Amino acid sequence: MEPELSVNRTVGDIHPCYESHDGSSIFTSNPSITCVLLYIFLGSLSFVTICGNLLVIISIIYFKQLHNSTNYLILSLAVADLLVGVLVFPFSMAFTVTTCWYHEGLFCKVRGSFDVTLSTASILNLCCISIDRYYAVCQPLTYKSKINDRIVGMMILVSWGIAALIGIGIIVAGFNQGKCDESCLIDALISTTFACVFSFYIPVIIMLSIYLKIFLVAQKQVNRIQNTKSGASVSKMERKATKTLATVMGMFLLCWTPYFICIIFQPLTYDVTPIAVIETLNWLTLSNSMLNPFIYAFFYSWFRSAFRMIITGKIFQGNFCNTKLL
């Protein structure tokens, strides 16, 4: 059942950048300082997301040393995150949840489709990377035969295919983040559950299981070499492995879990979730696309070397594609 808004509650009370005009909400012609600072901050997130993922994409494409199966998965992830920065961020800034919440127009559906498709593609690529790391750490002798370019290509195609199907399916079902009449409550609940299960919960369960297995195997490997290395060195290796895995999963769960918990319960409640809460959680999920280049690339020294050469413009001063990255 659709909750009614109080007649005394204007759009300006809900969002600092919008005002009510002839019964519709429009972007204010006299934005407040809060509105200006908000969009400067969100614009900065978009800029950092685009630049960070561009660095990853250029590095993998340009430097031949980075041409391997694992980095192709990172490349696919960076493309998804770059498109989030290019398409989803500006859409979300120009036409935020406030207007889409109350007006279910074509623009809002297109924005929602891009958001769902690209975010799902990003999550599924993260899942594929965890599978690649599982075989690299847990089954190193068979890694080359099981994770080759053909398999990686199939993983990438499946990830993007599933993401596109989910995005299109939600649009066809008429799913919207906002409220609906009592007659469409079941449809919204089914659509929301479907999106959450395939876009988040299944990939999260897979990644948690895989990274737990990787951590346990890595710990066993450290114990095996304990006789040849000092206790301090072993302890350092354990801390590094724990820190890496905790960072990967911790940042992902921090960014995505609050949003999916909120939307899975939204159709079941009669109370309206404050739009500021929905908007904040939505931007928190999008920020994961900004963090991914740092998490998955900055851990590796060869990526850092590639980034330095790109940022300083060294790659434009000659042919360095065969350079040995340290």
Image: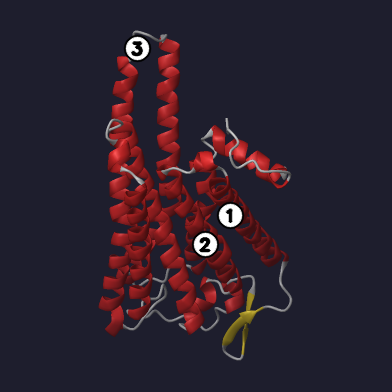
Between 198 and 159, the residue placed more toward the observer is 159
Between 86 and 280, the residue placed more toward the observer is 86
Residue beneath disc 1: 49
Which residue appears at 39% of the width and 60% of the height?
120
Horizontal and vertical percent for residue 112?
A: 45, 72
Horizontal and vertical percent for residue 192?
A: 32, 69
Between 184 and 45, the residue placed more toward the observer is 45
Between 288 and 125, the residue placed more toward the observer is 125
Which residue appears at 57% of the width and 86% of the height?
24
Secondary structure beneath label 2: helix
Q: Which mark is residue 84?
A: 2
Are the residues at dot 3 and dot 2 in contact (C-beta closer than 8 Å)?
no
Q: Is residue 62 visible?
A: yes
Q: Residue furthest bottom?
A: 22
Q: Is residue 142 left or right of residue 78?
A: left
Comes first in the chain, label 3 or label 1: 1
Are the residues at dot 2 and dot 1 in contact (C-beta closer than 8 Å)?
yes
Horizontal and vertical percent for residue 191?
A: 30, 72
Rendered view: 301 above or below 160: above
Secondary structure beneath label 3: loop
